[in-house]
Image (cartoon, grey):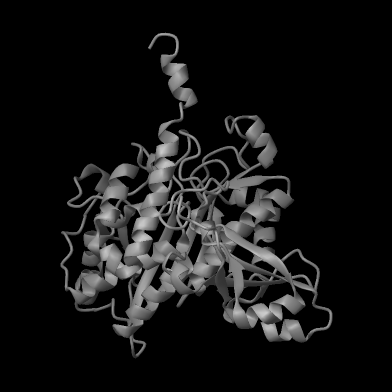
Amino acid sequence: MTIEDYLADPASRFATVAMTDTNGLLRGQMVSAGSLKGIAKNGMGMSPVTLALDPTDVVLTIPGVSDGTSDFHDDPLIIDPATARRLPWSKPGHDLLVLSNYSGGTSELCPRSILKRVLERVGDAGYAPRYGMELEYTLFDETPESARTKGYRNLKTATQHNSHDLVLYQVQQTEWYEAVAAMCEPLRIDLAKMHEEIGGGFLEACIAAGEGLEPADQLVILKNFLRSLAQRQGRCVTFMPRWTEAADSQSIHVHISLKDRDGRPIFHDPAQKNGVSQTFRHFIGGLQTYVGDMTLLFQPTVNSYRRFAPGTFAPPGLSWGYENRTTCFRIVGHDAGSLRVENRLPGADTNPYLTVAATVAAGIVGILEQIEPEPETIGNGYAQEPARDFARSMPEAIERLRGSDFAKDWLGARFVEAFASTRESQHNEFRRKIPDVELERFFDLG
């Protein structure tokens, strides 16, 4: 289905034009078929303040956009015709979905526009990344209302016990798995795999590897529509990295391989240990060198940092190893067609466009600068002191991003300051909160 086909059909009435905000949420409007004709040529207005919103529309601070100098004007969203797909539950004539991104000055702040620019720059350097993503989430037999009524405590998860890859629970939840697969077809999501994860109701869905913006587009759509599917069933999901102290951490793992401008895989060298080429080693070196300063992109909320509490299966530092899940950068595969690196740092609350942009940029600069990685981690990485580390708190992550010349070069100085400012606003807001656990511990006898 193309936009042209949709507009040519006399039965077409409305379409949804959407963009992705900083949190990875789709925001947009339903527009008439007649309006879509003009939007396809000239774009659709939306205020840049949209990029300053937290998930529940708390307005965070972006200098010049949402502070005292802002006039809250609209800037044009430019639709991407290649993203046209069908909404899974809408009637024919109302079921077109098309993605967009900001143009002009606001494109400097727009996550999808940033990834587009990074991929173009990588292409100019002679490389073509291929990537896929794994999304972890928890499914509850609760409505959003019942979860709120319970204070988000003692919630009923879709399954009871820890159940990694347990076929019993997969079969028990056949209707959910089949509904997810059916939903993905009209949305053109290339769903490669689904399975039970570590924890009650804890699930994973994997996007197949692809090139360009498409895999990131698909993961954004998947996250948003998993929420919709659950709510349509009277249930809910969460992508919080740590929604309870009893649960393991939730992530988005990014798998990346690389080709040269002639389409040849360049991570594999059969003469080297585990087939890891020198170019691949430099890519790993770039990840170790630059990812830590961009922790804020991979851990973008105050909850993100609870994922690294002792006892969770989160990365111990910026380590790497072959087929080693106790490292941050896990090398996977055994031949030219399968060898890749898995970035295990991003939380499930990260924005896929920013996650991919930061990961690809760091690795490519490692190649361009021929950066040697630290020694490979052999054995259990949790029992070893990592040579390099990411930011362990939100204030540290904000400071490191603001001070990163690399991030300013590849992601843009305006974006770096804007993103850091929004996260600083969020952190300051939560610093004023008094958690229930502190009252329970200290109110009477503290």
- Find residue 25 and report its image quarter: bottom right
* Picture quarter with the C terminus: top left
Q: In the picture provided, is 169 more to the left or to the right than 407?
A: right
Residue 23 image offset from top left, x and y in percent: 50, 55
Q: In the picture provided, is 40 more to the left or to the right than 20?
A: right
- Compared to residue 39, the image places residue 400 above or below, namely above
Q: In the picture provided, is 34 more to the left or to the right than 442?
A: right
- Find residue 407 and report its image quarter: bottom left
- Find residue 99 and report its image quarter: bottom right
* Res. 42 visible in picture: yes
* Res. 192 visible in picture: no
Give the mark count: 0
Q: In the picture provided, is 272 more to the left or to the right than 58?
A: left
Residue drawn where x is 74% and y is 83% of the image: 7
Residue 336 image offset from top left, x and y in percent: 33, 79
* Picture quarter with the N terminus: bottom right
Query: For the view shown, which residue lies furthest in the bottom direction?
Result: 262
- Compared to residue 106, the image places residue 157 above or below, namely above
- Compared to residue 45, the image places residue 161 above or below, namely above
Residue 313 image offset from top left, x and y in percent: 38, 45
Residue drawn where x is 16% and y is 73% of the image: 370
Query: For the view shown, which residue lies furthest in the right direction?
Result: 11
Residue 235 image offset from top left, x and y in percent: 68, 45
Residue drawn where x is 57% and y is 65% of the image: 74
